[in-house]
Image (cartoon, helix red, strand yellow):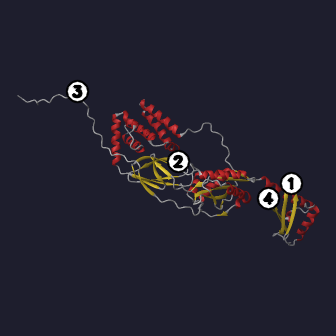
Amino acid sequence: MMWTSEQWTKRMAGTQAGTAHPRRDILAESPGRGSTFGRDRPCPRDGGLTLDWHDSAGYESTVDPMDLPPHPMMRTVLLLSLLLGASSGAQGTPRRVAVLPFQALSGDVPGRAGPRVTQRLTTEVRGVERLELAEPPSAEPAAEPPPEALPQARAAVKEAESRRQQQDFAGAEAWLGQALDAYATPAGAVALPNGNELADAYALRAAVRYSQGRDEEAARALTFALTLSPGRPLPLAATSPLFARTVERVRVALQEQPRGSVRFVSMPPGVPVTLDGHSVESAPVRVVEVPPGMHLWRAVLPSGEATGGLVEVLSGKEVEVKVLPPGEGPGAVLAAALAGNRLDAAAVEAATALGHTLRAELVVFGTVSRTDRGLAVDALVLAPGARTLRRVPRIALDADLLDAGPPLRELSSTLASRGAQTGAAVSLPVVPAAGAAPAPRLVQVKYPVEEKPVSAPKPAVSTPDRAPLAPRKPLVRP
């Protein structure tokens, strides 16, 4: 039914008496907008009535009739305006939800399971009428895209070789510096299948520095060339007998030095690692008997992303390499915390920053772990405005994500209906995947490349062009 002005006037008349009233139900219907259910209750301010309106979409508004103008008709108009406005707002303002990348918790999680869960949940959020997917704004294309690391490094090496042939050693050194910087970036290191190309660049730097009289720096660069490509002859040594003897002398000195070790720690654990192009098991792993010098490492994360870099090993010491999800900024901070299965205030601050950037009302992220029956997805919901972290009940999926649709669709519907009240509130620090398998123990392996010991080169003896003369008697004095 639709309340008439007279009915509203009679209904509101009791509020002027200043007496408490029992709760009563009011039902008002508005054509085209559904029904609105209201209840009046005693007003704590003066004992009158306060009306709590709940529309069919679950939106709520409260009005105290004592605050309305005294004219009965004006009260009716204002109350109907409030009723219609609440119903209209419920239908026209969807919740903006940002889905951030889910992270695998171990290396035995099927490849790209985290990105696949992220994509499936994103698809379900798009399909819910009362949700709007918060996506990053489309950036304007750069006038000139940044050059790729490996082609940039190779072009710089080629220019350095040309400058060296022209005996422009200072120019060659400058170009080699640019090349080695490009090789050392994660993008450059990942693109190299092994250290041979990088070793040749360091050998060229050694030759340039020897020509400049910088013998100690040249020997250091030559050591890096030998350790990056163990057991492989340097092509540059074949161009000069003098440089070849220098290479062998540095190689002998290198073999006489005490060796070091490298300890790889990954987030998540269980990531396979290679060192100088050879497999050294999965992290956490300690590689011993590593020759001192520069070495190239590479790893592939469960997300399918590859990362790598250079590490310098010192004689008799151990150096640690942390294998983390690539990237920088708040996204990298949150990804590393999720991969480590521990969220602290810094991780929540990073998620809040990402939510503000995306102008999202809700932010969803979480982990993917391995179970006996398949996979477990542990999702968390954050309202950036309130900075309140809430945990969603665990979702069990098969290893191939064939049955991921219904549970992720249900999660999306819950986000639409409950919003920031989805899940149960948790306090920091929080373990996203409670009961996940413990991290594997540290294993120790030997450096996979064994070089044959070499002796110091002997001085070269010139070969005579003709047969030696027959020995003759020593001259004696008559």
Q: CA distance from mark 3 to mark 4?
A: 108 Å
Element on which disc 1 rests: loop
**Which residue is tagged 1?**
32
Element on which disc 2 rests: strand
Tell which circle, 2 or 3, labels the residue nearer the N-terminal end. Answer: 2
Q: How many marks?
A: 4
> Which of the labelled discs sits on residue 277, or is there none?
none
Q: Which residue is nearer to you in this view: 316 or 255?
A: 255
Does residue 101 appear to the left or right of 33 in the view shown? left
Residue type at numbered disc 1 = Gly
* Residue farthest to the top, as pictured: 466
**Which residue is tagged 3?**
466
Residue type at numbered disc 3 = Arg
Q: Quadrant of the N terminus?
A: bottom right
**Which residue is tagged 4?**
57
Q: CA distance from mark 1 to mark 2?
A: 57 Å
**Which residue is tagged 2?**
307
Residue 43 sits in which quadrant?
bottom right
Q: Quadrant of the C terminus?
A: top left
